[in-house]
Amino acid sequence: MSKQTTKNVREKTVAAAMSLAAAEGWETVTLHAIAAQAKLSLAVLREHFDDKTDILAAYGRGVDRRVLEQTASAGDDTSPPRDRLFDVLMERFEILNEDRNAVCAILRSFRCDPKQAVIGLPHLGRSMVWMLEAAQIETGGIKGALRVAGLTGLYLKTLWVWARDDSADLAATMAALDKNLSRAERWAARIVP
C-alpha cells in the first residue's frame, strides 16, 4: 500500500470514528462499525490500527500537527513562556472544538471505562511534550519530565472545563486555563528552584 493510500485509510478511519462517537457515543462504537463507516474491510482497518485507543491516538496526533502548524509563527516569540503555552493550549482547545460532540462523547465514555483513560495517558503525555516544544519550553531531563507530567494534569483539568464550556469564545476555558497555569507556576517555584 502506498504512503498516500495509507494516509487516506488512516484519515478516513479517524473521521469515521469521530462521526460515530458524536452520533452514538464512544462506548458503543465498535471497530466493525468504524470500518463500515469508513468503507473499509475489517482486515484493512486491522492493518493500520490495533484498537480504538490507537484510533484516538491517531486523532490526537492530527490535533498535535494542526496546533504545531497554527503556532509555527510563534517560533521567534519573545513573550513569556507562560503566555506562549497559554496560546498553544488555547489553539488546541479551538481545534478540539471542531469535533466537540465526538470529543465530549469520548470523555464521557471514560467515566464508564476508566481503563481507557489510563491506557490513553502515554499518548496524551507525548502530545503535551509537543505542546511544550511549540511554546519553546524545555522538555528534557528531570525538569522536563516534571513539566510534562504537570502539564498533562493541568490539561486534563482544563479539558473537563472545556467540555462544559458552550460559549463561542471559550471564556470559561480560558479562565480555567489561566488559573491552572498560575497555580502550576506557583507549585513549580516551590518544587524546582
Image (spheres, rainbow, N blue to C red):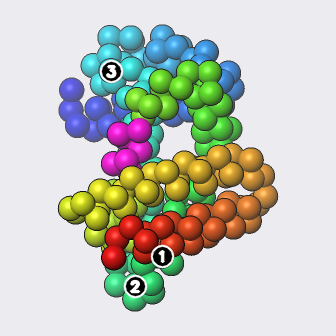
Question: For the residues marked 1 and 2, what is the alpha-carbon distance in whole angstroms?
Answer: 12 Å
Marks 1 and 2 in Cβ contact (< 8 Å): no
Among the two numbered marks 2 and 3 on one chain, the one whose residue lies closer to the N terminus: 3
Instruction: Sort mark 1 into few (<14), some (14-19) or many (20+) by Cα contacts within 10 Å.
Output: some
Front residue (pair 45, 39): 45
Helix, strand or loop at disc 3? Answer: loop
Q: Is residue 13 visible?
A: no
Residue 64 image position (x, y, % from top left) = 41, 53
Dot 3 amino acid type: Asp
Q: Is residue 176 visible?
A: yes
Residue located at (27% from left, 19% from top):
47
* Location of mark 1 (residue): 82
Question: For the residues marked 1 and 3, what is the alpha-carbon distance in whole angstroms?
Answer: 37 Å
Marks 1 and 3 in Cβ contact (< 8 Å): no
Magenta stretch: includes residue 169: no
* Location of mark 3 (residue): 50
Identify the magenta region.
121-127
Among the two numbered marks 1 and 2 on one chain, the one whose residue lies closer to the N terminus: 2
Among the two numbered marks 1 and 3 on one chain, the one whose residue lies closer to the N terminus: 3
* Location of mark 2 (residue): 77
The quarter of the image holding the N terminus is: top left
